[in-house]
Amino acid sequence: MSSPPIHWYPGHIAKSERQLKHHLDKIDLIIEVRDARIPLATGHPHINRWLKGKQHLLVINRCDMVTTAAREAWERWFRARGQRAVWCDAKAGAGVKRVQQTAIRAGNQLNERRRNRKMRPRPVRALALGFPNVGKSTLINRLAKQKVVASARRAGVTRTLRWVRLGRELDLLDAPGILPPYLDDQQAALYLALCDDIGQAAYDGELVARAFLQLLIGSQKRDASGITISVLETRYGIPVAEKTRDPAYWLQAAAARHTSGNTTRMAQRLLDDFRKSALGSIALELPELRGA
Ligand code: G4P
């Protein structure tokens, strides 16, 4: 994408990261939440610093937003790297019980060690960590079986750190979304923008929408990604023909039809539709596509 680099590291994220460091020594388990549409781009490059001496539970959320083939491809990829991920759809609640059981199992190991040292058992202290908008708050509310933290489809909504008691066996620290200070990988930054994981001020919506169109138009043969190019015609009435293979041209044609020629509003509509899954299941990242 030939556009200014996407960069987003607002003050409140820097501040909460500093606060988080003070709590780290109290944590037994880190529940790292990623987005199934972009499981690599939502992996924090410095996670190992936070993990030091703690157990790690990798949760891939939003599994309802990708195809089964994409999920299986990622499962194989993680397994080959000795990592097991728990997949869930925090919105509908699928897989949430497994997250809880796996976290409690980690606590059992901890309490085994405590008992051996003649110490009283205690709930496992977990930290839910992940990029903004991956679904942490929704997952915590599901685990708590009630709304204990605010959730919204907007980057940077969870801002303060708070302990939440989840039954007798699990205490969870609800942390704000974290991000690396520099988004070195601009392809990943584009995916984060598409999935609304970074603030809108960080990018030009129209350029991001065009890059998204390019991605749709260019990836017709990748079944696992779930992309069906015909959705551009069925939903917006503008087929991808010879001329409209050019994303700028398609956007103009769609804007002429739906937003009185306003391409900015049309770009926003396209992005919103993708984010709501109105264009179907779309895995932006697949192991083979990221050279992973
Ligand atoms: P965060 O704490 O990581 O920032 O994310 P949060 O839980 O606030 O979730 C952001 C949005 O994503 C919410 O939508 C939430 O419902 C949705 N979401 C979370 N997990 C999943 C999932 O597994 N699948 C799907 N499809 N959506 C998920 P919202 O539009 O803000 O609210 P609403 O739709 O719940 O009203």
Image: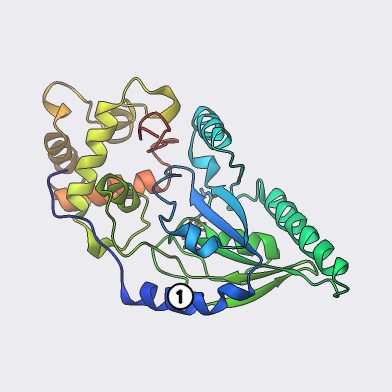
Badge 1 residue CB within 8 Å of ligand 1: no
Q: Is residue 196 left or right of residue 76?
A: left
Within 10 angstroms of label 1, few (less than 14), some, or many (20 or more) residues?
A: some
Quadrant where the C terminus lies? top left
Q: Position of residue 30 (x, y in %)?
A: 59, 61
- Numbered disc 1: secondary structure: loop
Residue at horizontal 56%, vertical 62%? 52
Residue at horizontal 62%, vertical 72%? 148
Residue at horizontal 81%, vertical 64%? 113
In the image shown, does 83 or 116 lie closer to the viewer? 116
Quadrant where the N terminus lies? top left
| Amino acid type, mark 1 | Arg
Q: In this orientation, does residue 266 appear? A: no
Up the image or down, 54 lies above or below 35; here it is below
In the rendered image, which residue does mark 1 sit on? 159
How is the rendered protein coloured? rainbow
